[in-house]
Image: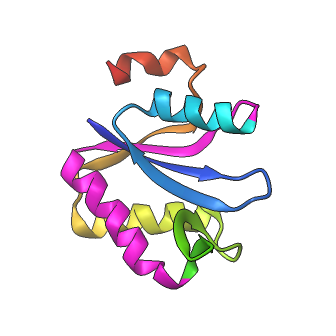
Amino acid sequence: MYYLYLIQSPKGRAGFGIAKNPQSRNRDYVAHCGDIVNFPYLYGGTIAHIKKIENVIKEQYIDNIWHIEDRPLEWLNNNISVDQLKDYVDTLIEERHYRVKLIAKNYNFTQDVFNDLLT
């Protein structure tokens, strides 16, 4: 299983990414920010479908990708909320019949209940 996570910065900026191990990826965010960081929405599915959704987000939101010094990041401009991004992902999954489902809300690596899904 592969994972697509949606994230929100402390100032409200929506972001996204993919990971083979969301526990490890979540720990990376914690290490960089110095506090527990939640992934408001975590999806799981086939690697091909997860990667496709990530690519479609990048294509669809090309004009709204946040850049630092001409480097595109996996963060969106401030005018798009994490809930709007979730709605878009849900629509993609439904319309394109991707084998991906929402598996956790407000996930962080400290949640033992999720460990069984990741092994």
Question: Most extreme residue toward the right, as rendered?
Answer: 11
Can you say which quadrant of the picture contains the C terminus?
top left
Quarter of the rendering containing residue 46:
top left
Decide: is 74 above or below 111: below
Marker count (numbered): 0
Decide: is 42 above or below 71: above
Query: Is 9 part of what is drawn in magenta?
Result: no
Q: Is residue 36 visible?
A: yes
Magenta stretch in the rendered image: 34-63
Q: Position of residue 76 (x, y in %)?
A: 60, 69
Residue drawn 58% across and 63% down? 75
Q: Is residue 93 visible?
A: no
Is 78 left or right of 98, judged from the image as shown? right
Question: Most extreme residue toward the front, as rendered?
Answer: 69
The colour scheme of the drawn protein is rainbow
Quarter of the rendering containing residue 59:
bottom left
Quarter of the rendering containing residue 69:
bottom right
Is 35 left or right of 85, judged from the image as shown? right
Can you say which quadrant of the picture contains the N terminus?
top left
Is 51 left or right of 90, judged from the image as shown? left
For this rendering, which residue is in front, 16 or 28? 28
Decide: is 93 above or below 35: below
Question: Most extreme residue toward the bottom, as rendered?
Answer: 63
Residue drawn 46% across and 81% down? 62
Query: Is 40 part of what is drawn in magenta?
Result: yes
Q: Position of residue 60 (x, y in %)?
A: 41, 79
Residue drawn 65% across and 66% down? 81
Q: Position of residue 29 (x, y in %)?
A: 61, 38
Residue drawn 60% across and 73% down? 67
Decide: is 71 above or below 98: below
Is 8 left or right of 11, judged from the image as shown? left
